[in-house]
Amino acid sequence: MPNGYSTPMEMLARKLDSISRLADSDRAALLDLPHTVRNLPARHDIVRFGDRPTHSCLVLQGWVYRYAALAEGGRQILSFYIAGDLPDLQSLHLHRMDHNLATLTPCVVALIAHDDLRAVLLSNPGLAGTLWRDSLIDAAHYRERITSLGRRQALGRVAHLFCELYLRQKAVGLARGLSCPLVPKQSELADALGLTSVHLNRVLRTLRGRGLVTLSGGLLTIEDWDALAEVAEFDQTFLHLANNPIRAREAAEAV
């Protein structure tokens, strides 16, 4: 089982605990939820625009991304998902996909049948409420991303995404100190941030030159949380984490 969990549903429980504490009965129902584990290659479409999926996908290992494809071949990456995320829960109620969901890296996922999800949610309203909260937080991420794309300068956009990805990974135990995986390539980050690869490269050089971040071997290290958060105008309220917000001076000690 990836990432040190004995069952896939334990990973989902850890993610949900980061946004709202699960009751014991809801946790037990979640851990009993039937699922099928699959290994998927990198850059594989899990679901495509127009599909009518019968399962939702839980990420167990690797990175997944949501994207929209344009007729001339362009792509807008809408969001990134990490271990513990349930990125297509909305397909439980929106029966026809209006976007694409794909693996960024080789991934291990758990597929959960919609019929099984409906049954467990009907009998466990507390769990249904927690998953509804998770969907609302996903929408909050989109609002923040729209603000970045529409109003933040390139430096702020990149800094904000780095702060977000660090805190999301920290919440589920994937960050150590002020370091976390940063899997997307520069071209993929550019497609998420509305920048050209050349422009993004200049921004990354600026962040390094100011001593704010280090990027090496797919690892992001935040060297100065206070300064990076200031550049990003970062307020973690939109993440709606159950734990107390990380204060700037405490970030270096957070694990």
Image (tube, helix red, strand yellow):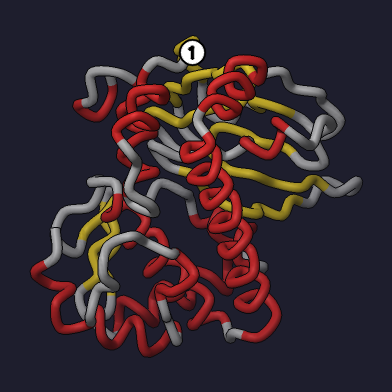
Q: In this view, does 177 lie above or below 159?
A: above
- The percent coordinates of residue 27 (x first, y second) are 34, 30
- The percent coordinates of residue 199 (x first, y second) are 58, 74
Residue drawn where x is 43% and y is 64% of the image: 240
Answer few, some or many: residues within 10 Å of disc 1's Cα (few below 14, many 20 plus, some between 14 and 19): some
Q: What residue type is labelled 1?
A: His
Q: Please count the marks in the image.
A: 1
Residue drawn where x is 53% and y is 76% of the image: 157
- The percent coordinates of residue 107 (x first, y second) are 45, 26
Q: Quadrant of the N terminus?
A: top left
Residue drawn where x is 49% and y is 70% of the image: 238
Residue farthest right in this picture: 71
Judged left or right of residue 138, residue 214 is left
Q: What element carries label 1?
A: loop
Can residue 234 be seen here? The reply is: yes
- The percent coordinates of residue 138 (x first, y second) are 57, 55
Judged left or right of residue 180, residue 64 is right
The answer to which of 186 and 176 lies nearer the viewer is: 176
Residue drawn where x is 37% and y is 56% of the image: 168
The residue carrying mark 1 is 35
Q: In this view, does 176 lie above or below 153?
A: above
Can residue 195 be seen here? The reply is: no
Judged left or right of residue 87, residue 222 is left
The answer to which of 123 and 45 lies nearer the viewer is: 123
The answer to which of 153 and 50 lies nearer the viewer is: 50
Q: In this view, does 227 lie above or below 125?
A: below
Q: Quadrant of the C terminus?
A: bottom left
